[in-house]
Image (tube, coloured by chain):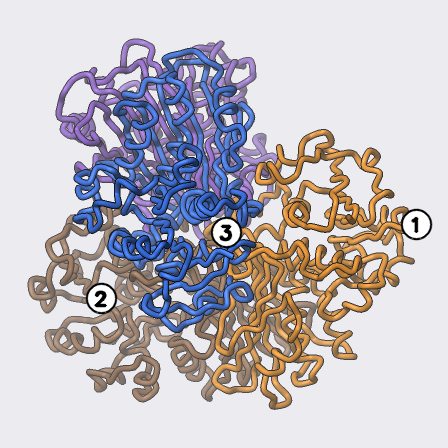
Chain colours: A orange, B blue, C purple, D brown
Amino acid sequence: MIKVGIVGGTGYTGVELLRLLARHSGVKLQAVTSRKEAGMKVAEMYPSLRGWVDLAFSTPEEACLTECDVVFFATPNGIAMQQARELLNAGVKVIDLAADYRIKDLAEWSKWYGMQHASPELVEEAVYGLPEINRAAIKGARLIANPGCYPTAVQLGFLPLIEAGVIDTSSLIADCKSGVSGAGRKAELGALFSEAADNFKAYGVAGHRHLPEIRQGLARASGAPVGLTFVPHLTPLIRGIHATLYAKITKDVDLQALFEQRYQGEQFVDVLPAGSHPETRSVRGANICRIAVHRPQGGDTVVILSAIDNLVKGAAGQAVQNMNILFDLPEGTGLDVVPLLP
Amino acid sequence: MIKVGIVGGTGYTGVELLRLLARHSGVKLQAVTSRKEAGMKVAEMYPSLRGWVDLAFSTPEEACLTECDVVFFATPNGIAMQQARELLNAGVKVIDLAADYRIKDLAEWSKWYGMQHASPELVEEAVYGLPEINRAAIKGARLIANPGCYPTAVQLGFLPLIEAGVIDTSSLIADCKSGVSGAGRKAELGALFSEAADNFKAYGVAGHRHLPEIRQGLARASGAPVGLTFVPHLTPLIRGIHATLYAKITKDVDLQALFEQRYQGEQFVDVLPAGSHPETRSVRGANICRIAVHRPQGGDTVVILSAIDNLVKGAAGQAVQNMNILFDLPEGTGLDVVPLLP
Amino acid sequence: MIKVGIVGGTGYTGVELLRLLARHSGVKLQAVTSRKEAGMKVAEMYPSLRGWVDLAFSTPEEACLTECDVVFFATPNGIAMQQARELLNAGVKVIDLAADYRIKDLAEWSKWYGMQHASPELVEEAVYGLPEINRAAIKGARLIANPGCYPTAVQLGFLPLIEAGVIDTSSLIADCKSGVSGAGRKAELGALFSEAADNFKAYGVAGHRHLPEIRQGLARASGAPVGLTFVPHLTPLIRGIHATLYAKITKDVDLQALFEQRYQGEQFVDVLPAGSHPETRSVRGANICRIAVHRPQGGDTVVILSAIDNLVKGAAGQAVQNMNILFDLPEGTGLDVVPLLP
Amino acid sequence: MIKVGIVGGTGYTGVELLRLLARHSGVKLQAVTSRKEAGMKVAEMYPSLRGWVDLAFSTPEEACLTECDVVFFATPNGIAMQQARELLNAGVKVIDLAADYRIKDLAEWSKWYGMQHASPELVEEAVYGLPEINRAAIKGARLIANPGCYPTAVQLGFLPLIEAGVIDTSSLIADCKSGVSGAGRKAELGALFSEAADNFKAYGVAGHRHLPEIRQGLARASGAPVGLTFVPHLTPLIRGIHATLYAKITKDVDLQALFEQRYQGEQFVDVLPAGSHPETRSVRGANICRIAVHRPQGGDTVVILSAIDNLVKGAAGQAVQNMNILFDLPEGTGLDVVPLLP
C-alpha cells in the first residue's frame, strides 16, 4: 500500500482528494494536515466523509510526512515551494496541486504570482503533470506540478490541432467558463451565494494567472510561441469548466478523425461524436475531459468544446492519475466514478 | 452474475439505477427497455454513462425480460401492476420503484392514484422494501414495493420514536422539502428551470400521494393509526430531501441514545452527533439517510432532521440495496459511493 | 422632500434601501456612510445603481446625519444602540433595521445578542415597526425597531389566528426557510455559493435570535406567553422567506374569511384564494407578504403558508413603509415595484 | 392613453410586458389574449401581478384588437406574420417580439425558420426595432420587428467598432451565454431544472436562428457582408445574456472613447469605465445594456463584454421602448426600474 499524506486538507481540492483516495484500493491515508483544524475529525468538517475517512486533521509536525511515499499539496500557492525540498530529500514523491512548479520561466512566475520562488532549483526538475502529453516523464519524476483547471481543459482542446499543425497559432481564443468552486473554499465576497448565484460575468480579462501556464503548454506543443486571448468567466455552477476554443484552420483535414486518433487509448479524454455539445454535468465528479469538434457552416474557424470537472480532471483526479502513473498502478485506479447526472 | 433488466430506463430513477449498477460487481445488465427510444444507445441519451454502459434501449419484446433474474420497474405508476405477474410466473424477481404495490388498502390506493389496480392479488404478497424495518421479509420476497422518497425520509425519522412509544402519535408533523428531480424527467411547466430556480413553495398541502404510504408505515410501527400532517415543498435543488419532523414527547428518554441504538449496525442510516444539522449535500449521490435529533430549549417537542438523496436512498439506491438482500449479496455491494461534496 | 441618511450602506439591506429610495418621490438621499468605503461611488460598488444613485459613501463625520430628517441604520447589531441617542436629540427620526431595539426584555436581549445594551432607556420608547399591528404607534414614534425577516413572515401568518383566539397557543410550530441573502453580505464560509447552492439544511434548531422576537410579538397578540418551536432552514435562493406554520385549531371558524377580514385594507398583505400555495418568487423584489390558509383533510391542524422577500417586506421595504407612515406619506410611496417573475 | 393589446400573454415575454406596462403611465391595457387560458385571470396564472393586472385572458375574438392603438405579439414565430396585416389595415401599430419580420431576405428566413412567409410584402416595410441604430425609422413605422435577445447584445457590442471601421469584419467571434428563460415557457426536457441547473453547455454550434439576424445587422453597419462565428451557450441563470465578443483591431484608436462617444445620450446603453466586467445581475429586470471594452495585454484583439436581461432589453423592455418612440412619449416611460441586485 502506498502511504499518502495530504498537506492542507480543508479546501475543496483537499476534500476531493479524500473523496477519491477513500475508495482507492492501493493507498493508505497516513495524515491530513491543517494547522488550524488540528485535532478535528475530517468527517466532522465534511460529514460526506463519515464512514469513509476516520482520520483527524494533524499539525504538519505530528504528520510525519517524511515517512509517506507520496505527499499531495492541496495548499495555496507558495507553500509547496517551501516544503517540497525536505520531502524529496527524504525520498518522498511530491504532487503539488498549486501553481508553484508549473511555470518554467521564473521571472514570468514571479510576475503573475507576486512572490520570489523559494526553491527555483526544483522548478526545472518538476514535471508538468498532464499525462496526455507527459506520461513518460511523469513515470520517472520525483516532483509533479499538477496542472491548473483552465489549463487542463484548454490544452487538451487545442493540442491535437497544434501538434498536427493545422491551425494558425498566432490568434487563438479561449473563452472559458468556470464553476464557483474554482475559487476555493475561502470566505470571499465574490464567491458568496448571493453574489454568484443567478449571475454571469467575465473576470480577469486583462490577465489571469492561468494565461502563462496555457501559453507555455501550447508553445511547447507548437515549438514556437503562440498568440492567445484567454477570457475566464464565472458561471453559477458548483463544479465544472467549459472551454470554448476558436482557431483559424490553415490546413484542411478531417478534424473529427484527428481528435479521435490523438486521444485513442486515452482513458480520461473522451472525444464525442461529431455534432455533440459536452455538458459539464456529464463529467460531474469524474476524472474525464469530454471534447467535441465543430466547424460551423464549413467555414475556416474551428470551434472546440472541452468540459471537465475542475476539482477532478482539473485538480484532485488528475493528481491521483499522476500518482497512479508514478507508482506503476493501473492509471484508472480509484478513478472509477460514474459522473453524477442529474 | 445476476441478470438484470430495467423497464423504463429513460427517467431519473432509471439512469440512477444504471449509474449504480454499472459499477456493481455482482450483476450483468441484460436489457434496458424504452419503447420510445428503442435502438438508441443509452449513453447517447446520457453521455455521463459513456464508457460505463454500452447497451442500447430495447423494446420490451426484444428485451426477453423473463430470462432475467430480477427486473426493476423504473416506470410511471400503473405499469408494473400490469407486467409483474408474467415475470413472477417466469421466476423473475420484481422490484417496483413506482407506487403500484406500496399501499395495502386497495380502495385507498385507487383513491390516491386514480386507477383500478390491475393485479390486486399481488398487493398483499408484495413486500414493502424498507430494509431497516423489513429485512427478513425482503430476503424471501418475489415482489418488492420500493418505498417512495418522502416516505423513506419520514419513516426513518419517526420510527425509533414510535417503536419506543415515546411520542404522541395523534398529531405528527412532517414538513418536507424536495429537490426538483423528485418530479421526474417529464416535460412539465412547474419543473422548468425558470419556474423552479430561485423559488420556494409548498405544494399539495391538501393531500399528497405519499401521505397514505407514510401513514401506513407509521401505523404499522405504532400498532394503531396515527395522525399526520404532511406538507411537501419544492426547493431549488436537483437532488435531496430534507424532512423536518415534529412530535410531542410523552416519555422522557435519552433521544440521542434511542436513535443510536435503533440504527446501530444499519449501514445506510447515520445518526449524527447531538446538535448536528444534516445537509442534503452530505448524502448527494449516496445511499444513506443522515438523521439528527433535537429537543429545542429542552421543551416537550422533539425535532428530527432527516436527509436523503431522493434518487438514491429514496429510489434507485434503496432498490439496489433490496436486490442485494434478495440475492444474499453483502447489502452494500455497488453502493460504495462517497457523497459528492461540494 | 424628506432628507434621508443611511448608516452602513454596503450590505444587502443598505443596497436594497438605495434601490427603493432611488425611485421614491418624496425623499432626498443626503448621505450613505461607510467608514471602510468612504470616497467610493455607491454605483461603483453596486453597478445596478448606475444612473440612479450618484452619491459616494462618506464617513459618518462627513455625513452630517444630524441634519437629516430620518436616518436608517442598515448596520450590524450593536451600532444603532450607540448612535441613535445623538440623532434623536437632534430631532432626527431613526429607523433601525438591526435588532437593537426589537426586544423589550433587556436580559433576554443580552442573552441572545451577547452584548450589554448601550441605550436601555430607549428600548422602551422604541416602537416595533410592524405596521399591520402597530400603525398608530409608528405614526407618532421617534425611534422604530424594524422587525426581523423571519419575525415578519411568522407574525403576519399567526396573528389573525391568535387575535381571534381560535388556536392552541401552547405548541405553535414555525418551520421557516430562508434565502441566503438573509445572512448578509459578509464573507462567511457557510454563505459561499459552493456551500449553499444545491444544498438544503436546517440550522440553529437549538435556538435562533429571532425566536424571542417572534415569541414577544405573538405573546403581545395573545395576551399571554406562547409556546413556539421555531426551526429555520437555509435554502438556495438569493431572496425569499417561506414560513410554514402549524397550530391546533380550538374553535371552528371560517379560516379563509378570518384572514381576509383581518388583512382587508392592508396594502402589503395579500391573502391568496383558498387552496393556494404562495411562491417566494411571487414576492421577489416587492414589499408584500402573501399568505395562504390550509386545513388539510379537514383535520384540526391549520397550516399557514407565508411568503415574503426577506430584503423587502422583511427589511428595507418595511423600513420605507415605516418611514412613509412616520412622515404622513401615502404608505405605498416608493414601494410600487412589481415582483420580478420569472 | 394608448390602448394596448397583447397577443399571447402566457409566455415569459408576455408576462414581462405586463410587468412593465402595469406601471406605465401612458397606456391602458385593453386585452391580453390566450386561446387556451381564455377566461382565467392573468393574476391567477402569475400571482406576482396580483394588485397590478386585473384583466383576464380573452380569446382573440373577444379582444377587439383592431380597436387598440398598438398590439404586441408575444407569440411563437409564425403567428404575427398571419395577423399583422388585418391590424395594420385597421390603423393599429404592431410590434412583433417574435422573428417574423426581422430578416429581410425571405429565402434566408424560410431556411432558418422552416416556414413560408405568410405576408412577405410586409417584411420590407417592417422596421428593425433597435432604437440605437434605427430611432428615426421607428418613429414613423407601422410595423416593428423587435430584435432577438442575442442580436441585441451582440450588435450593441460590435456596432461602434464596425461603424468606425477599426476592426477586421471577416472573422468576428461572438461567444454568448444565455439564461434559461430565453427558451421560453415551454414544457421541454432541456429546460427542466434538473437538466439545466448546475450545468453549462454550448448548443446550436452548427447554426442558430439568431445568426442571420446578427449578420444582417452587422452587414448593414459595415456596408458589406461580415464573417461571424456565433456560439450560444446555456447557463444556469433565469435571466441574462452575456456576450463576449472578439475581433482583430485594424486601426489604433482609443476604444473606450469610441464607445463612450457612440452611446453618449443613449439612455439604455451604459458604457462602463475601462477595466470593468459587467455582471448580468447588474441589469436584472431593467432595460439596459452594459458594455465594457478590453484590449488584453495591449494586443491586437479587442474583447467586448455586453450584458442585457434577455426578457427586458432583449425583448419586452425594448418593445416598450419602441412603443414609446412610436407614440412620441419620453423613451424611458415605464422603464424606470432599478435592477434587482442581489
Q: What element carries label 2?
A: strand
Q: Do the residues labelled 2 and 1 touch (CB within 8 Å)?
A: no
Disc 3 secondary structure class: helix
Marks 2 and 3 belong to one chain = no
What residue would you read off at disc 1? A89
Position of residue A297 measured from the top left corner of the image (x, y, whole percent): 47, 85
Viewer-proximal residue among B286 and A222: B286
Q: Farthest residue in the bottom direction?
A: A252
Instruction: Determine if marks 1 and 3 fall on one subunit.
Output: no
Q: Can residue C297 be seen in this view?
A: yes
Image point (36%, 21%), residue name = B247
D91 versus A34 height, above or below: below
Label 1 with label 3: CB-CB less than 8 Å: no
Q: Which residue has dot 2 on it? A: D72
Position in image of residue D71 (x %, y %): 19, 67
**What kind of residue is marked 3?**
Pro
Instruction: Assign the C terminus of chain A to one quadrant of the image.
Output: bottom left
Q: Is residue B194 visible?
A: no
Marks 2 and 3, how far apart at CA: 31 Å
Using the image, name the chain to which the residue with label 3 belongs: C
The residue type indicated by label 1 comes to Asn
Helix, strand or loop at label 1? It is: helix
The Cα atoms of the two marked residues, 2 and 1, are separated by 75 Å
Number of numbered discs:
3
Image coordinates of residue A269 in percent, x first then y, are 62, 68
Q: Mark 3 points at which residue?
A: C47
Query: What subunit carries mark 1?
Result: A
